[in-house]
Amino acid sequence: GALMLKEQEERRKQLEEKAKSAKADAANAEEEGDGDKLIQQIAQQMLQSVWFQRWNSLVIAVHAFAMASDQYDATGATKLWSQTAYYVCNILFLVELLVRAASSEGFNDFWRNSFNRFELLTNIIGITGLITQEEFILLLPSIRLYRLMVYFPTLEALLMSAVASTAAILNLCLFITIVALCFSIAGRYIFGNSMDEWNRSNYGTFKESVLTTFQLLTGDSWSAVLYSAMAAMSGTLAQLFAACFVITWFTFSNLIINNLFVAVIIENFQVSETIENIGKPGYVAQARETIKIGYAGLYHSFNMMRNKQVLLDHATGKYTPKTKMDYTFLRTTKDNKGKAPSRHDQGAVRKVQMDVIGKISVKRDAVYQDEEEEERETVMGCFGPDNGLRKAFVWLGRRWWFDVMVFSAIIVSCIFLMLAPPNEDLIGESALSRVPSSSIAWMNRMFTVLFTIEFFAKVFAQGLLLTHNAYLKSGWNVMDSFVLIFAWVDETGVLAESGMAKVVRLARALRPLRLMKRNKGMRIVIDALISTLAPVVYVVVFALFTMTISGIMGMGLFGGKFFRCTTPGAEFDPDTWRGGKAECSGTHVSDGSGTMWSNPAPAGVLTPRSWIVAEYNFDSVYRAFFTLYRVNTIKYVAIIHDCGDLTDVNLSPHLEHNPTLALFFVIYLVVGALFVMNPF
């Protein structure tokens, strides 16, 4: 905490020095009458201002919220608010760009800064979107969300590493594209349109062959492509050749190309620097340190009051260390030669006491190193070292046979947990069907009592919360305490009639974790796993930024377009540009054929038409999150084929109407799935 405060103080001093320097330069420029220099100095001073940076971050957040709210089916008021926010935020972004331009020493100086080039391009895209009112162009500036990473140094370092590796990634993508094109053209010659009737992932057209080759590269449903390729060929040798072709590209892409992505990431991402940044104190560490200091003060104040090291001064209403008060009164009494202090002396004494109280700072006591010093502490506020009940529990907790008994009880309770059904009405389906339910309940009650005795043995020895080695200061003990509490709630049946009963019974699943606590090797493995969570959390947040930006862009491209009719009769006509929601009304007599997007009803059945949306779509931000998460898990083939059939809002999809839209998912897979997810 002290190091963090020191760094913040140094950063503040540096900003103040820069601001003073800018002010001095501005004053000199004003005296010299150089107006351009004065404007430049003012602009530099604004850019160095913390409040200017925070203001821009607020504008970015408001702009992103407006884009996320601008759904295809939003109300008129929401649409109006989003449009207003677009205009206001783009004006403010343009003002920021002008300030950056004014702080530069000419256009060349401005253009040399990559951030300025990025902002100039983003402003041009935003203004173009406002002029054309094209939804996708309007939402494209959502990429500015990456700028909010400046408040998280570790995320900013990851972003800078990603930007630094752009050249290497582009070279790798160029290599992959050339090799994939070779395989795509070869597949066109080998299979032609023979796979069309078997699978939509085929080599019938050049676009489909490229998408199929990319699908094999990522590994999604590669076996379906393999079997379709074999089924399209006649003869054993031809089928063997088709299988070898598919397997060769699949193996080459997964074993070599994917590992090349990992190699590029390892080369450009400084793992040691990331770990070092994580270790540096930040906002979370500052909050944690504040809580820690507050807890330490409460703990030591409680100890001093309990041991009567501080006494309440009724004159001031505050607590004062006893030794200091005794010394002050003794010295005052001695100076008065045993006489009662006069009113003037009493005022002087009270003044001394107030000075002493003002200088009191509670500090940590020395750490107790052995069990004898630990036993001198009073636990739970009333059980001292000479208490008979505490001595009995401490003696029991130090017996080896008691540990063996508890360990055996944990193992037996875990076995019961595996064999017993979750509910009593399912007892006939379990391995304990011949054991009376009353016996099972009695055994569980015995286990709970034994675990409770162990809990009190630990608490009486170490203390519960306010002692130095308190029981609840260990995360493993906190978990044990929760399991024990839920066990007693389950035994007493307090929540048996409520909806929380299932949650209480669910806590039984945590019992096997108690075995890990008693095994040092397992604890080391779990602690090592937990220690890796911090870097993983940062990668997850980085991926969430990418998913949010891509989801907002996807809303502009695909919002409201993933709808379709459940029955034939509303097919899209590319010549008249009709066929969709308006035609998907009334009823339909099924002929048993159905559509390519829904299961057919039996022939002769009267079915109502319904305008439904696909399970994975981009109609809102959270639906876009679900869709992109599925794409991240390399389960995207159905989504990318649906995307290629999209036409427009309130119009039915049409087979291969716009396959170029699949490029959005290809780019996202390269950036999001192969590049962002590989740092895991």
Image: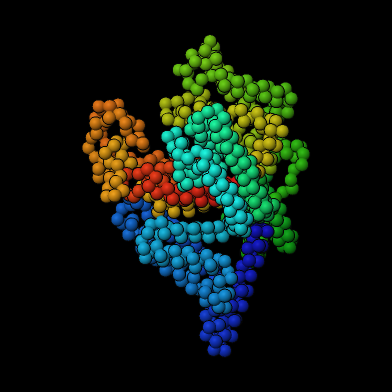
- Point out residue 635 in the picture as x, y percentages from the top left corner: 50, 39
| Vertical order, 36 against 113 (above or below) | below
The residue positioned 57% from the left and 30% from the top of the image is: 237
**Viewport quadrant of the N terminus:** bottom right
The residue positioned 64% from the left and 47% from the top of the image is: 260
- Point out residue 640 in the picture as x, y percentages from the top left corner: 45, 44
Question: Is 222 on the left-hand or right-hand side of 134?
Answer: right
| Vertical order, 24 against 91 (above or below) | below
Question: Is 407 on the left-hand or right-hand side of 67?
Answer: right
Report which quarter residue 110 is drawn in.
bottom right
- Point out residue 566 in the picture as x, y percentages from the top left corner: 31, 36
The residue positioned 35% from the left and 32% from the top of the image is: 599
**Viewport quadrant of the C terminus:** top right
Q: How many marks?
A: 0
Looking at this view, is 443 or 361 the one in front? 443
Looking at this view, is 424 or 661 the one in front? 661
Furthest-left residue in this view: 586
- Point out residue 353 in the picture as x, y percentages from the top left corner: 65, 60
- The reply to whether residue 170 is visible in this rendering is yes
| Vertical order, 134 against 636 (above or below) | below
The residue positioned 44% from the left and 54% from the top of the image is: 553
Question: Is 73 on the left-hand or right-hand side of 189?
Answer: left
